[in-house]
Every structure is written in C-alpha cells, then in structure tokens.
Image (cartoon, rainbow, N blue to C red):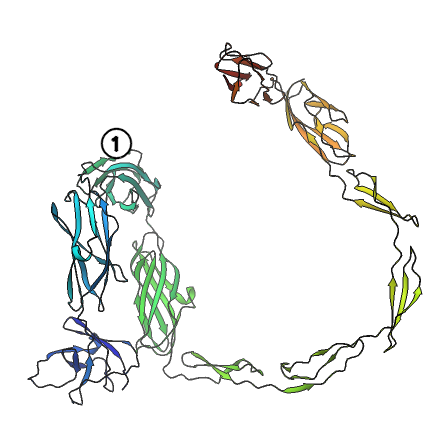
Amino acid sequence: MKIKKVLIICLSAALIMLESPVYADEIYTGMDLDIEYDEGIVSINGQEDDSNNFEKEQFNLEDQVQIIEECDKEASLFSDGADNRQVFKIASDNKAPALESLKLNKNEVTAGEVIIITARITDESGIKGKPQIAFYSEESATHTVYLEDKGNNIYQGFLKITEDFTDGEYPAQWLEAYDVYGNTKLYSLNTDFPEVIFTVKKVQVDNKAPILESLTLDQNKVTVGDIVTITAKITDESGIKGKPQIAFYSEESATHTVYLEDKGNDIYQGFLKITEDFTDGEYPAQWLDVYDVYGNKKLYSLNTNFSEVIISVIDVQKDNKAPVLKSLKLDKNEVIEGNTVTITAQIFDESGVKGRPQIAFYSEESATHTTYLESKGNNIYQGFFKITDDFTSGEYPGQWLDVSDIYGNRKLYSLQNYFPELKIRVLCDVHAWNNGSIIQNVTCIDDGKKLYVCTACGTTKIETIPTLGHKKVTDQTIIPTCETAGKTEGSHCSVCGKIFMQQNIIPAIGHIWDNGIITKIATCKEAGNRTYTCVSCGKTKIEEISTLSHKFGTWRTSSLATVFAPEKQIRICRVCGKEERKSVGSKLKGTMKVSVTSIPLKVQQKTTVLKVTNLAKGDSIVSWRSDHTKIANVSGKTNGTCVIIAGRKVGKTKITITLKSGLHKSVTVFVQKSPIKTRKITGIVKTLKLKIRQKALLNPVVSPITSTEKVTYKSSNSKIVAVNYKGQIIAKKKGTAVITVKSGSKSVKCKVTVK
C-alpha cells in the first residue's frame, strides 16, 4: 500500500517524526484520537488489553498533527490484527552529537580582547539547547562559554578577557552537547583537541574613565517633526559599557535625554525627535554620562566642554495633515479557499500613524471583509486575509482604508478611486466556462489556441486546436540556356510555402566564343575593339583593346604648396607630348605665433615686445589694427615687428593682426596711469653649485615683460659669492650664499654653494 501523508505529532512535549503510512481511508481534522506508543510504535484509535504497558494520551488532530508533504513510498505495516488500528513507525536517534572541529580566532590575548570560539557539531536529529565549553588554568578559575547556533552545523561563542584572568595558558578542558533525544557527550578536549589553547599576557586593570573627544549635531535649527542626529566620539582602552546618555535642557521645557548607540570605530549616535512637548527656544547640551567595562564613569558637564552644542526650536506648531497612503499591493490576486492574502501598504505621516490602519474588501455576493494592518517599520504596514468559506467566488475590490495619526488627523481612503486595480479574485471549485474565443489561428505547422473564461470567477484556460497539415505540390524541372540558369524538380506546401524538396540551381551553359576579330585598332590616344561571336547562339560581344601606354617622364614640381593652393606637379608623354597635371597634398594651413597675448603699459609708454612669427608659405601680414587708438596705437610691419604706443587714456584695447590667408589673432593691451609693477619672476634656479672662480649668469624673466621696475641682484655674503648688476655670479671662496633677485616687491632666491 502507498504512503499517503507524513505527519509530525507532538506527544508529551516530545517531537516524534512519523515516516510510515497512514492506512485509514481518511483522517478528519478535529477528531479526537487515542494515541498508544511504545518502543518506536505508535497506535491511533487502537485497542489494547490493560495488561499491556502502553502510555495513553489524547490529542486533537487539528492542533497537533500537521501534514507536511505528499509522498509515494512503500512502507511496512505494524499491527496486532485489530482492524481499526492505524500503526506508525517512529524514527529514533541513539547517537550523541559529533564534534568535528574546534578552533579559536586568536591564541595570544590580553585584557579587554575577545576570543571567538567556533565549533562544527553534527547530529542526525539536531542539537538541543546551547553546547557549553570550558577553559582552565591552575592560577585562575574555570571559564565557561555557551555556543550559539549559526546554521550549517556551526556553533560560535565569545570569551572576553577581563581582570579575572591571570597571565598564563588556558587550554580547552571540556565541551558538552546533547541532541533532541537526550543523547549527550562530554568531550575531553585535552585529549581530542590539545591544540585548542590561548595564552593571556600582561593582564592589567583599566582605571581611566572614557574620553569624550567630539560632540556634533546634524542640524541646529529645527521645528516639530524634525529629528536631530547626535554624534559623539568616545574612546576608552577597555571599551564602553552599555549606552552613553546625553541630556538637553531648557528652562521653559523639561530635560530631554537620549541614549547613544555604538556605530563602531568609537562613534556613538542617537536621535532626538522634536515633538509638541518642545517649546520655542534654545536647548543646550547639559550633560553626558558614560562608563567603561571596568566601571570607570564620567559625567561630562557639556555647558563647559561643548557650549556650542545647542538645539534651537522654532515655529512649533501641531501637525494638521492626515496620513498619506503612498502605495498598496497584494502578494497574490487569484486565490482559492484556504489561501492567505498578504496586504502591504506604505503610509507616511509627519507625526506618526496611531493604532492600526483598517482595510476593507467588498463583493455584492458576499459581506464586507476587513482586517487591521500592523506596523513593520519604515512606514510599511501589513495585514493578512485568510480565504474561508465565507468568501464566494468572484472579485473583491479594495473598498476603503481608514487611518489616523497621533494628532487625530484621519482619512478614509476610497480605494476604488485611489487603487482601482486592487482586487482579490476568489476562484470557483467547479468553473462555468463560456463558449471560448480564438486567440491564435491554427496553421499548417502550429497549433491554434482557444481561450475560455469562467463566467463565475473570471478564471481562464486555454485549449489547443490541432494543426491542419501541409498541401504538397510539385515544382517542375527548368532547362538551362547559354545565359539563363535552370532548376531541378522540387516540391513545396501551397498553403504556407514550406519546402519539402529544394529545387537546386542548374548553372547556365554559358557562351562558346570564337577567337574574335579586331574591328578597331588601338592608338596612343584612343582604345581599339575586338568582336567575338558565340558559336552556339550567334550572340556577339565587343571587348575593348586598351590604348597604347603613354611614355611619360617623371613627375616634377611646377609650384610649391602655399596657404592658397596645394603643390602642383606635371609630367609629359615623350611620344605624343600629352601633358598630365596633378595636385599633391593640400594647401597649407594658416599659422601665426605672437610673442605675447597681453601687454600692460603705463600711459604714453612705448614697447616693441609684440612680434609675429611662424607664417605659412605664401602668407603675409595685411593689417595691424587697434580697437581704441586713444588707449593704444600700433604701427606694424610686414616682417612681424611693431611699435605700440600707449595714449593718455587708461583702459584696455585689442591689437588685431590679420593675415592674407584670413587668419587673425588679437593681443590685449592694458593701459594704466601707474607704472607697470612686476608680478612674478621666473627662470631662476633654486640651487646652484660652483667651483672657486667659476662664473654663472642669472637670466630672470620678469612678468609682465613690460614691467617698469628695475631688476636688482644682491648676495647675502659677497665674500663667498659676488653678483653684479647684470646678474653675473662669481664664486670667490668655499661656503654658501644666497643671491636675491628682486624687481619691485617680488623677489626670488638662489642658494649658491661654492666647493
């Protein structure tokens, strides 16, 4: 007989897995059964004499029996002959848990450090409770740790090294584990895992209180509904214990305290929500209370140490806006009796939603069904609908959602307006199908499809319409000619065009040409012709006889490339004198380089610093022009030099140089009443090494180049290194001196070392 169901039965607080079959025709939910079990055999509805030593217990099948899977396995029946007995075999485990591996994350530690203990423990039935491990030292007490289940047979615990530990070695002593059937084993770790040992060095007690290094707020000016993030950096050698507490105080309002959470890297953070309890005004940080794992405590007076940490509350007013329903969705839309639908809503409110929002679904054929939504955090609310026999088949659209906030602002959302697509469709047990409609036409090779819809619940189904099959026709043979290809015999479907036998191409036979005759003689200037005739069909064709080749000389340059034309070349046929000309490359691109891009001048100052160079071949300067001649005028030459004279008017103007090729560039001239001062000196090396009597010349570059301030040179020790007014350096004796190059207020230094 085939197994029907696998059950889990809870008997006398023990979990028993039943793996053999239920042989009754049916077991109904809710019926009371007599349970008899002894040595791995359980009897349901069984009858036994009083002389048999069975424990008896009644349970309700609906509460304590759960069908967990369907299966199809053969199993043996255990029975004493009673017809109404239903017998099960209980899977049992008599093996203790197996400790496969044990390791520590570190072996040398000191006070304040934490050791992570990781063990791999396996058992057929599963570990019960928490395995316990002990470490021992003759100089110190035994230290035990419980191991937490981390999944995949991994168990982990943490041992903090405190002042109770003395210096020395702490080998693992024992580990105890037991399973759900009570099988236990106490492992002697000195024997099984002698390498699991840690050494404690330099244990000392921390007597210093935690240090508050910094304290900041993410915002200072806030109003009701805002949240202030408080961030503190607190350091301690041994570690902070618990949560530091901070207080903010105002004479017009109560003291507000916040606990700070550990965010790692000595950072602690807390959040203060501004509610209607706050009045307008300033709330300075008052105190911060913190202590470490050794009990060293400090109460910081923040008015003294962090007087700038102040929260200013302004424009306090009550929230008068109702909660906002942002989204609403179902985890499934089509259900049957017994299914559960999960409803998830996203609801926002400045002050917070009060209580549980309520939602309703409605159908004309059934009553209105409501449920409450529970807060899941992050503005998410969730509820559940169990589809019971109260639901008739059909659609249940969302009707309304009722929600209010902590200030009593309420809104009843009409879901047919906000979320018209939100519907639960309860399917029928027996469908009433319509006549159906074709949704995919049948073809020679593809099945068609017909869609049916249940008139009661709207469920759909699709039926397949078989294919029609092909209609085969023959494609006749085509004989090839001289120019036209032929085809072999083939076949295809006259309906869809599918090819059954491909017609292969028979190539055209091709013309058979004679040797041809010359009908036009080729010359040096003109091509000739040869005429051929096909011996099969008489068709003719004419082939051109190429002209005789010219005897050209080599190409020579007739003119070089300029900005207006590319290079020209020519060659001449020595036979007929025919000339051929060509252009090589492209015309040159116009180029121009100016010595400066901007020129500062004093009124009526003259300069020749502007020079134009790098003109392309064939190009030339056609004009020099000033936009404002009263500010500065220019007199330029075609060779690229010019004289610029500043006028009496201050301001700026542009000097534009235009080339024959059309290229032009502009240089800006600034005219001022005051002398032109030096802004920068470059071109001077920072260090220089010379031998005695060796000379060197400094070549400073003054910017701007039109500066009217004189360049001077000065040695810090002229007995070691001397410098003249032209910048020439002379090394006199061993030592180091600094040459200062100065123009106006700007100066640079060159350190000269004489060896």
As drawn, 474 above or below 344: below
Find residue 203 and report its horizontal and vertical position in percent. 18, 40
Find residue 752 and report its horizontal and vertical position in percent. 51, 18
Nearer the observer, 88 or 514 = 514
Find residue 403 and report its horizontal and vertical position in percent. 33, 60
Nearer the observer, 686 or 648 = 686
As drawn, 520 above or below 479: above
Left or right, residue 489 beside residue 528? left
Left or right, residue 745 beside residue 655? left
The residue where tag 1 is placed is 304
Find residue 107 and report its horizontal and vertical position in percent. 23, 47
Identified at 17% across, 46% down, the residue is 169
Left or right, residue 744 beside residue 314? right
Identified at 19% across, 58% down, the residue is 192
Count of numbered labels shown in the rendering: 1
The amino acid at mark 1 is Thr
Residue 288, quarter of the rendered image:
top left
Viewport quadrant of the N terminus = bottom left
Identified at 11% across, 45% down, the residue is 139
Badge 1: residue crowd in 10 Å (few <14, some 14–19, many ≥20): few
